[in-house]
Image (tube, rainbow, N blue to C red):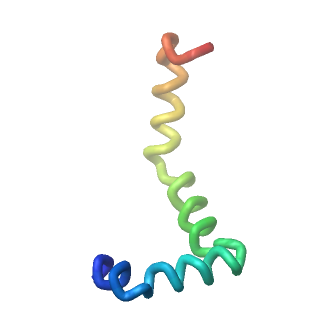
Amino acid sequence: QLLADIQDGTFAREWILENQAGRPVYWALKRKLEEHPIEKVGKELRAMMSWLKK
């Protein structure tokens, strides 16, 4: 379905409307992903990796 949406222009139209509206769906999804437990674990693991610190 995604390929069909790209080919027929549906994706582009929806993306333009999403951006004109201030990207509410994008920001909601981003917040949801940032709150996922794996993000907390990743942050803790990166803190233990001294070679990543500047």
Q: Is residue 5 left or right of residue 46?
A: left
- Between 40 and 13, the one nearer to me in the picture: 13
Residue 50 drawn above or below residue 8: above
User: Which picture quadrant has residue 19?
Assistant: bottom right
Q: Can you say which quadrant of the picture contains the N terminus?
A: bottom left
User: Which picture quadrant has residue 8?
Assistant: bottom left
Residue 11 pos. (x, y %): 44, 80
- Between 7 and 36, the one nearer to me in the picture: 7
* Residue at x 44%, y 45% (from the top left corner): 38
* Residue at x 58%, y 68% (from the top left corner): 26
Residue 21 pos. (x, y %): 70, 80
Q: Can you say which quadrant of the picture contains the C terminus?
A: top right
- Between 10 and 43, the one nearer to me in the picture: 10
Q: How many marks on residues?
A: 0
* Residue at x 55%, y 52% (from the top left corner): 34
Q: Is residue 22 left or right of residue 50?
A: right
- Between 2 and 28, the one nearer to me in the picture: 2
